[in-house]
Amino acid sequence: MAYSYLLRALDISKELGDTLTTVYANLNIGNVFINYDNLSQAYQHYQKAFYGALKKGDKAIAVTCIINMLPLAQADSAKYPLQREIAAFVSHDLRSEVMGNYAWLRIKALAATRQGQYGEAIDLLKQSIGAIDDKLSPQVYRWGCMQNIGELMLKAGMYDEGKRVMRTCLKEAEAEDFHEVEASAYSLLSDFY
């Protein structure tokens, strides 16, 4: 049902020439496809949202798109490469902006994770939380980093610390009634317990 409404929103936004609504519709359609494990469709919509956000100059959405594509690249970097998106991101001089710094740290954390360097990845994710907390405080980005940190700690065998980070994330998300974060955190915890 959500998918059909999002497709309609996408059509209407294109008819109206509303680039930003088109970007959001593509981003949300990508999220729907992720929930249905249709990774290739999700990736295509995230790319459309990413390039639309760059065109519109919306740094926060461009970063969100890259972050949403990171797990796809991590799962299969040959099928879902991010080199072109990262190059476009850097060429728009977003790296010097707050959200750019946040995304850059997340990208470096992904690279460290791929190399099995969980300690370095955890440090980079903690730095990315600092980058957003100091300037913008978008809680959803903070919670996403906290989930990644908790997951890496669990993978690295740091069970008590990982559970503590995940519980803090859950507590903060529950206080804000942000159920999407809660469901994601519980799902990650269930993978380990």
Image (tube, rainbow, N blue to C red):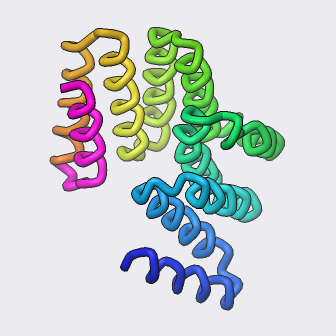
Work out whether 179 lies above or below 86. Answer: below
- The answer to whether 129 is drawn above or below residue 162 in the figure is below
Quadrant holding the C terminus: top left
Asked whether the viewer can see residue 102, the reply is no
Q: Relative to residue 51, is residue 76 depicted above or below?
A: above
Percent coordinates x, y for residue 7 in the rendering: 53, 80
Q: Position of residue 173 (x, y in %)?
A: 23, 45
190 with respect to 153 (left or right): left
Q: Which residues are magenta?
A: 175-193
Q: Nearer the viewer, residue 115 or 23?
A: 115
Q: Please name the predominant secondary structure of the magenta segment in the image.
A: helix
In magenta segment, residue 181 = yes
Residue 54, image x, y percentages: 73, 56
Q: Is residue 179 above or below residue 81?
A: below
Is the N terminus in the top left, top right, bottom left or bottom right quadrant? bottom left
* Residue at figure coordinates x 29%, y 53% from the top left: 180
Residue found at x 52% / y 10%:
117
Q: Is residue 166 magenta?
A: no
Q: Quadrant of residue 134?
A: top left
